[in-house]
Image (tube, helix red, strand yellow):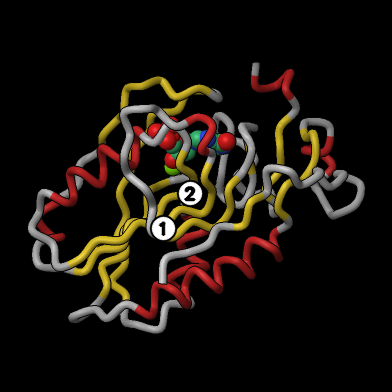
Amino acid sequence: MSSHPIDMRLSPLIGVNQLVVPPTFEADLKGILIPKGYADARIEKLAAEISEAPVKGDLLAICVLNGAMHFYDKLIGQIAQPVEVDTIRLGSYNGTSSTGVIREYPFDYSKCQGRDVLVVEDIIDTGRTLEKLVGRIRAENLLSLRVACLLDKPERRDFTVTLKPDHIGFVIPDLFVVGYGLDFNNRYRGLAHISVLKDELTR
Ligand code: IMP
Ligand code: MG
C-alpha cells in the first residue's frame, strides 16, 4: 500500500525550449525535471494508494500551504472517499535555505481528534517542517495518520529527523525546484512543470 517513489536523481533535465514555458521564466531555469503530465500521472497513483486504506467517516485532508496547494487539489479530486478539506499554513523558508525557524500560523489542532487524517505537503527537504507538524497533529488522539509528499530530497535530510512520509511521488536530487505550486520567494508557483532554477539565482 505504501508507495514506491519514482527516482529522478539521475534523470537528465528537459530543455526549456523542449516544452512550453512562459518566456518571462525561460532565462531563470536550468531545465525541467518533471513535466506536469508526469506529475499528474504519479498523483493519480498516490490517490489510488490512499483510497485503499479504510477510513471511518470522512478523511480529514490537511493541505500545507502554500506550496502544496496544486498537488493537494489534484490529489483530493481523485481520492475515492469523502474528504473534508482543511489547510494549515507553515513556513521556514527564506530564499533557498531553510531558516530553521518554523513560522506558525493559528490552527485548531483539536479538530483532528478521533479522525483519519492525511497531511499533504509539497516537498520534504531537511524534514524539520513536516516532523514538527506531524508531531503536533499526532498528539491529538487520532484514528489514523498518513503523510503524502509530492517530492523528497533525501540528501538534505536533518540527521535528527525520523519521519518518513507514507506516500511519496518522486525522489529528486539536491536542487532547488519551482513550479507546480512550489516557489522561490513567492515566484514561479504558476509555472506548469517542476523545474530547476539556475544556480546563480539561488545562491
Ligand atoms: P524542510 O523543513 O527543510 O523539510 O522544508 C520543507 C519546506 O521547504 C517545504 O514545505 C517547501 O515549502 C520548502 N522547500 C524545500 N525545498 C524546496 C525547493 O526545492 N523548492 C521550493 N520549496 C522548497
Ligand atoms: Mg511546503
- View extreme (right): residue: 17
Q: Position of residue 93 (x, y in %)?
A: 45, 28
Figure quadrant of residue 100: top left
User: Which disc number belongs to residue 148?
Assistant: 1
**Front residue (pair 98, 91):** 98
Q: In the image, is residue 124 above or below residue 141?
A: above
186 with respect to 196 (left or right)? left
From the Cβ of disc 2, is ligand 2 less than 8 Å away?
yes
Q: Earlier in the sequence, mark 2 or mark 1?
A: 2
User: Which disc number belongs to residue 10?
Assistant: none
- Distance from disc 2 to disc 1, alpha carbons, whole Å, reads 8 Å
Q: Quadrant of the N terminus?
A: bottom left
Q: Position of residue 39 (x, y in %)?
A: 64, 61
Q: Quadrant of the C terminus?
A: top right
The residue that appears at 45% across and 53% down in the rendered structure is 149
Q: Position of residue 37 (x, y in %)?
A: 71, 65
**Front residue (pair 62, 6):** 6
Q: Amino acid at mark 2?
A: Asp
Total labels: the figure holds 2
**Front residue (pair 125, 72):** 125
Q: In the image, is residue 7 above or below residue 25?
A: below
Q: Amino acid at mark 1?
A: Ala
User: Which disc number belongs to residue 122?
Assistant: 2
17 with respect to 202 (left or right)? right
Query: Circle 2 — which element?
Result: strand
198 with respect to 19 (left or right)? left
Query: Circle 1 — which element?
Result: strand
Q: Nearer the viewer, mark 2 or mark 1?
A: 1
Question: Dot 2 surroundings within 10 Å: few (below 14), some, or many (20 or more)?
Answer: many
111 with respect to 62 (left or right)? left
Question: Dot 1 surroundings within 10 Å: few (below 14), some, or many (20 or more)?
Answer: many
The residue that appears at 27% across and 73% down in the rendered structure is 59
